[in-house]
Image (cartoon, coloured by chain):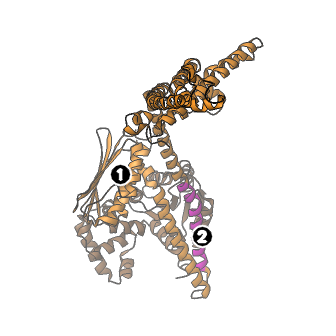
Chain colours: A orange, B brown
Amino acid sequence: MPQHSVWTELARRRYLTSTAPWRSGAYLLGGALLGALTLVVGLALTAVGAALTLVLVGLPLLAALPLTGIPVAALERRRLLLVDPAPAPSPHRTPKAPGIPAWFRLRLKEQATWRELAYTVLFALVLWLLDLTVLACTVAFPALLVAAPAHLAAVGGPGNGIRPAKLWLVDAYPAAGATALLGLALLLVLAHPLGAYAAARAVFARLLLSPRDSELAAGLAEVTRSRARLVDAFEAERRRIERDLHDGAQQRLVALTMSLGLARLDAAPGSALADRLATAHDEAGRVLAELRELIHGIHPQVLADYGLAAAIEDVADRCPVPVETAGVRLPRLPETVESAGYFAVREALANVGKHSGATRVRITAAHTDGALRVDVCDDGRGGADPDRGTGLTGLADRLAVLDGTLTVTSPQGGPTTLSVEIPCEPQAQSAREA
Amino acid sequence: MRTPSPVRPRSLRVVLAEDSVLLREGLIGVLGRFGHETVAAVGDADALRDAVSAYEPDIVVTDVRMPPGFQDEGLRAAVALRAERPTLPVLVLSQYVQRSYAAELLDTGDGTGVGYLLKDRVGQVEQFVEGLVRVAEGGTVVDPEVVRQLLRRRRDPLGLLTPREREVLALVAEGRSNAAIADELVISEAAVGKHIGNVLGKLNLPPAAGTHRRVLAVLAYLRG
């Protein structure tokens, strides 16, 4: 993979020793061959289409003609890399619906398709000829001069006389050698215009074939949307797992402990059986407790039922460090916001418990100026680095999907404040609470 | 104690709401084993209300999460039932330890004759049935797990309480009588009374007619 574009190489002293002249030559040679081929194929398609129009079969063929620019452009974008390693992405969007008709409709609607068609027409009629001419002038002509001694030898040696490039008569080896030297000098001198033309040619191709700003923005918007969809899907999956565990394993375990509890009543007190049953009963109880914690960690039900404020109280209850939550006043917020806020607080408190050495935590949360703002402050030793904690990074990603922000201020010696801000509007009160 | 108590105070008529067939059958079995009769076993909140109207039971036992929404329909139904019939004893079984659920339930009626237990407790069949009877008799039962979580998080005015007083309050929240608390802590009943008096004093709950100060203390405890 070449490190620099031909354009940058041109400005350097070591241009001639770099691969740039070779790459320029290869680019133009490819252009000449491909352009000629495009012309032939294009003419053939048009001719066949026009001829078949008489029997109507040709009509769809002609209709597809504007799309011929697409494969040519794709190939040209790849060839661009020869002279300019900067990526040349496709300006086309991915069709939302599967199937050929949807693809056709989208492509015919896109401006990029028509730009590509214009390029292809230009390529087939003009550009490849230009490429060929430049190549002939800057490479073929000096090459012919360089080849003079060999040419002379091929025609039978001195006396027979040749006209390299049809310029002058050469009939002796010294003259042929001089001609070859001249050719070599020309080759070196003309390598610069060759590179310049190739670079300019690439800029022109890129202009027509790479995405415009608006197309890039559309692509970015699509990426943002798809990320939001992924987060939603992740959230839905969480709930599904929670529900499955709750309705399946947990219920069965409760039923099992009930059966074991009843069995213990029937076993003779102090017997070996009673002891075994007691062990099994305790073990089942422990599994149940672990499962309950697990399910709660996946998605706490209180979040759905009572909202973020109650869920914060709930995490606070579970935190080993005393947490003050008097400053938490919140309306019901959109589900995704409540969920993101909850996991932020949980992560913050987990960090407090693990690293801070804090003795008190204060959580404040409010919805003001169209945004949810949650602050978790502890009196620990500080020095928390949001770049190091994978939990915090994941959290920031999660918030970014909602256009939210995560700020951590944690000077050495504390205190540490973790702030979350998510723009959102309060949810209309549900009928239940009204 | 491995066998059901031979002195059965009375057989309770229970309406049970639980959507899992497995648990419903199990609970009916447990209740039956201790001589209580399940007069109706239903699978959703609407059916629960109908069953209560139809059977006028001694106590309602309900799950929190039930169809159709699988959120807190059972708890909602319990709160609604208590609004209509403030003296109807209700025991709510929850899959989660959640203070919000317990607090909402205790806010209904005068806070007596309600229970909020973790579903895990039904495995401890004897304790579970004891709790049920206590609720049916007008007691208040809050799951020890909820109590434990609250204890872990020391907040005012509970911060004023001595460890012993907190211990006593936790047992009050679990619905124990003074005698039972004295037994548990191996102290005299008079000492229990004194501790409870101190707790009520520190929580600023002066004696007044028509209020259940013990319940208020538990509520103060839950709300923090």
Given the image, on which type of amino acid does mark 2 rest?
Leu
Q: Is residue A386 magenta?
A: no
Give the SS element for disc 2: helix
Nearer to the camera, B222 or A56:
A56
State which mark lies toward you, 2 or 1. Answer: 1
Q: In the image shown, does A155 or A294 lie closer to the viewer?
A: A155
Q: Are marks 2 and 1 on the same chain?
A: yes
Q: Quadrant of residue A260?
A: bottom right
Categorize mark 2 by other alpha carbons within 10 Å: few (<14), some (14-19), many (20+).
many
Residue nearest the observer in this picture, A187 or B132: A187
Q: Is residue B9 left or right of residue A428?
A: right
Identify the disc placed on residue A256: 2
Residue A354 location (% of width, % of height) = 34, 66
Mark 2 and mark 1: span between their CA atoms?
A: 35 Å
Quadrant of the image containing the C terminus of chain A = top left
> Can you say whether B194 is above or below A315 in the image?
below
Residue A386 pos. (x, y %): 33, 55
Q: Residues within 10 Å of mark 1 (few under 14, many from 20)?
A: many
Where in the figure is residue A254, as x and y percent of width and height?
56, 67
Which amino acid, mark 1? Ala
Q: Nearer the viewer, residue B147 or A379?
A: A379
Task: Read off the residue under disc 1.
Answer: A309
Q: Quadrant of residue A109?
A: top right
Q: Disc 1 is attached to a residue of which chain?
A: A
**Residue at left offset 66%, top offset 30%:** A156
Q: Is residue A110 visible?
A: no
Q: Residue at x 46, y 61 (%)?
A: B96
Residue A260 lies within the magenta run: yes
Q: Is residue A95 left or right of residue A308?
A: right
Specify whether residue B66 is in view.
yes
